Amino acid sequence: MDADAARRHLLGKRHEWVCRALDCAASVAAGWDGPATTDRERVVPPYRATLRRAGVLEAAPTVLGECVAAAGERLAADPVAAPPYVVVTGEGLLLRATLDKRLLVWVRAFRLRRTAGGGSRRYERVATDPEGAVAVETI
């Protein structure tokens, strides 16, 4: 499986889609009281809603299928814009395809930092450019 080919596809033909996902993240972060928030509810639900309004979530299953094809694989079933295929997390947007290996396609727009001991969380806006935000891996 060629994860690099899937990444190149996202940064090439799907560059605009990635940019829209990052614009949505910027919109969410603009509503915080500073450069970060400790409240997950100010990250995930508004990001999901903003992605939906922008059409990013609706297009995500198609984008996932394209990434799988670019990686040289085929999906056994058509993905949908919901878990387990499309997941909005505290780090951003995750597209997942289970093949012989699992293909994980990330648009990482946020970073979750935990304090020592794991007691406190802090969500920060990161990766404002597609090249820094897009990660594709197999596990």
Image: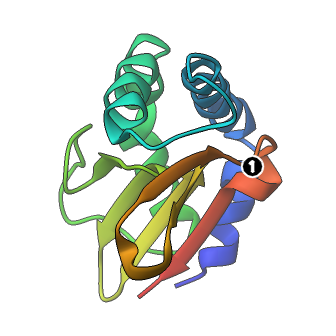
| Quadrant of the image occupied by residue 113 | bottom right
Residue at the spot x=34%, y=68% of the render?
Answer: 119
Identify which residue is drawn at 43% across, 28% down.
47
In this rendering, the answer to whether 65 lies above or below 137 is: above
The residue nearer to you, when weighing 3 against 27, is 27
Q: Secondary structure at mark 1?
A: loop
Looking at the rendered image, the quarter that the C terminus falls into is bottom left
**Residue 122 at x, y percent in the picture:** 51, 52
User: Is residue 125 found left or right of 114 in the rendered image?
Assistant: right
Could you say where residue 59 lies in the image, as x and y percent from the top left?
43, 30
Q: What residue do we see at 42% from left, 73% from top?
A: 103
Pick the residue in front: 24 or 112.
112
| Residue picked out by circle 1 | 127
Q: Position of residue 33 (x, y in %)?
A: 59, 22
Which quadrant would residue 39 be assigned to in this image?
top left
Q: In the image, 69: left or right of 58?
A: right
Check disc 1 and give the amino acid type.
Answer: Ala
Percent of width and height locating residue 42 = 40, 29
Q: Quadrant of residue 73?
A: bottom left
Can you see residue 52?
yes
Relative vertical location of residue 95 with respect to residue 135 in this rendering, above or below = above
Badge 1 crowding class, 10 Å Cα cut-off, few under 14, some 14 to 19, many 20 or more, is: some
